[in-house]
């Protein structure tokens, strides 16, 4: 067999076992030139003359897999609207839009007053740009984007984020699933020195259902989800890279003072809501202790003390970390223990508990936690 044909035969064998779209995504991630990808896949999709020679010997199963996944991507894309709000994001917006363009059927960008090239960049990707006068309310801006969309599903991204699709069929499974009104996705925070942190964010949902609109000036929530009126699930195979937590990016955007102001406004609007106090605590820095404690008090008083929502996990982790930084290690360990009752398998809470034990001089106790985490 000639070397070229041997390589094609090997590729065909691989494609029989895995979806073609998954392989395309892997090749793209590894930097394969577009010409090489099109030689193996895109030409085959067209059924052109060169495809007949390339795909000679493909099994029926391979062709059926190819067809099924091509149709799946097409069907899912026709139901998904990319929803964004931006302001002066010319340095990152193109990367975000490019990461999602294979998966969105329409793009709605609400611009809150950009003075750079953000609008032109969005329009170059075919986005419908909606001018919006900023009113110190993230929910109002996000809802404007949802209202302007025409497709039933909304995928919400920020300009400093990037969509990563590792399973080409994930969107198709989601939009055809019965029951969930939306899905959380794993968000990977890109931090300094190559570090990162993962957590779940609710970003993919039916925008055409009652109650599927945002509330809250900051750290906004979907109303029907917050009030537990709809079923939700976690969607694997799709994640979001967030590039906005590096020191350079935070300093560039100068969000600190604005976020504190909006968090105070949120608490004033919903003073008995534990999530509002948690949102304020996350923005306050050293002054956050009383807000964290108030959030926990209200969580129990509201009957949500047993809640396993993602934000409740972060409440325990963040409060424990804040206490340890202030040298209040005994209380920090107590908070970690309380959190582990609800989230016994959380590596973040186990790590936080281990850190407090180290801070207390209990190296043996910290080592025991490390051994448990390895099991």
Image: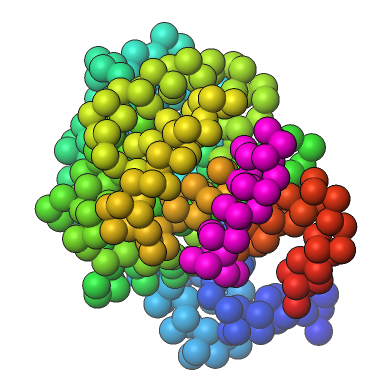
Quarter-of-image position of residue 143: top left
Res. 41 visible in picture: no
| Horizontal arrangement in the rendering, residue 148 relative to residue 190 (left or right) | left
| Horizontal arrangement in the rendering, residue 232 relative to residue 352 (left or right) | left
Number of disc labels: 0
Res. 13 visible in picture: yes
Residue at 73 percent across and 50 percent down: it is: 356
In the depicted structure, whether residue 13 falls above or below residue 329: below
Quarter-of-image position of residue 56: bottom right
Relative image position of residue 22 (x, y in whole percent):
56, 67
Specify the quadrant that holds the C terminus.
bottom right
Relative image position of residue 204 (x, y in whole percent):
35, 54
Quarter-of-image position of residue 181: bottom left
What's the magenta bit mostly, secondary-structure-wise?
Answer: helix
The region drawn magenta spans 320-345
Relative image position of residue 15 (x, y in whole percent):
60, 78
In the depicted structure, whether residue 200 falls above or below residue 292: below
In the depicted structure, whether residue 370 falls above or below residue 68: above
Specify the quadrant that holds the N terminus.
bottom right
Residue at 85 percent across and 50 percent down: it is: 361
Give the residue at the far top of this rendering.
Answer: 115
Residue at 53 percent across and 15 percent down: it is: 254
In the depicted structure, whether residue 143 falls above or below residue 330: above
Relative image position of residue 215 (x, y in whole percent):
24, 38
């Amino acid at each position: 067999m000639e070397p070229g044909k041997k390589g094609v035969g090997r590729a065909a064998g691989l494609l029989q076992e895995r979806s073609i779209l998954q392989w395309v995504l892997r090749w793209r991630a590894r930097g394969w030139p577009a010409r090489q990808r099109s030689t193996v896949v895109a030409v085959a999709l067209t059924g052109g003359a060169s495809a007949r020679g390339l795909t000679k010997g493909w099994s029926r199963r391979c062709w059926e897999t190819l067809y099924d996944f091509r149709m799946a991507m097409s069907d899912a894309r026709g139901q998904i609207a990319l929803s964004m709000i931006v302001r002066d994001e010319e340095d990152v917006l193109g990367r975000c839009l490019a990461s999602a363009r294979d998966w969105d059927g329409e793009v709605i960008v609400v611009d809150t007053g950009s003075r750079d090239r953000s609008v032109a960049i969005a329009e170059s990707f075919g986005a419908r740009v909606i001018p919006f006068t900023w009113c110190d309310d993230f929910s109002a801006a996000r809802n404007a984007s949802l209202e302007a969309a025409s497709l039933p599903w909304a995928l919400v991204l920020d300009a400093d984020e990037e969509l990563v699709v590792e399973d080409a069929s994930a969107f198709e499974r989601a939009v055809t699933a019965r029951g969930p009104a939306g899905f959380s996705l794993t968000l990977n925070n890109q931090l300094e020195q190559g570090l990162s942190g993962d957590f779940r964010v609710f970003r993919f949902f039916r925008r055409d259902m009652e109650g599927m609109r945002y509330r809250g000036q900051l750290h906004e929530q979907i109303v029907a989800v917050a009030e537990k009126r709809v079923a939700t699930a976690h969607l694997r195979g799709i994640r979001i890279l967030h590039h906005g937590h590096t020191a350079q990016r935070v300093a560039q955007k100068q969000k600190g003072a604005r976020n504190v102001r909006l968090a105070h406004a949120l608490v004033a609007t919903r003073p008995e809501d534990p999530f509002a106090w948690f949102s304020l605590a996350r923005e306050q820095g050293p002054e956050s202790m009383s807000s964290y404690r108030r959030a926990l008090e209200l969580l129990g008083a509201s009957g949500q003390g047993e809640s396993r929502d993602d934000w409740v996990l972060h409440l325990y982790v963040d409060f424990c970390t804040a206490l340890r930084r202030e040298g209040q290690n005994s209380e920090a360990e107590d908070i970690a223990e309380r959190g582990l009752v609800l989230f016994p398998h959380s590596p973040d809470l186990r790590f936080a508990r281990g850190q407090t034990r180290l801070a207390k001089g209990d190296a043996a106790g910290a080592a025991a936690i490390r051994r448990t985490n390895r099991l």
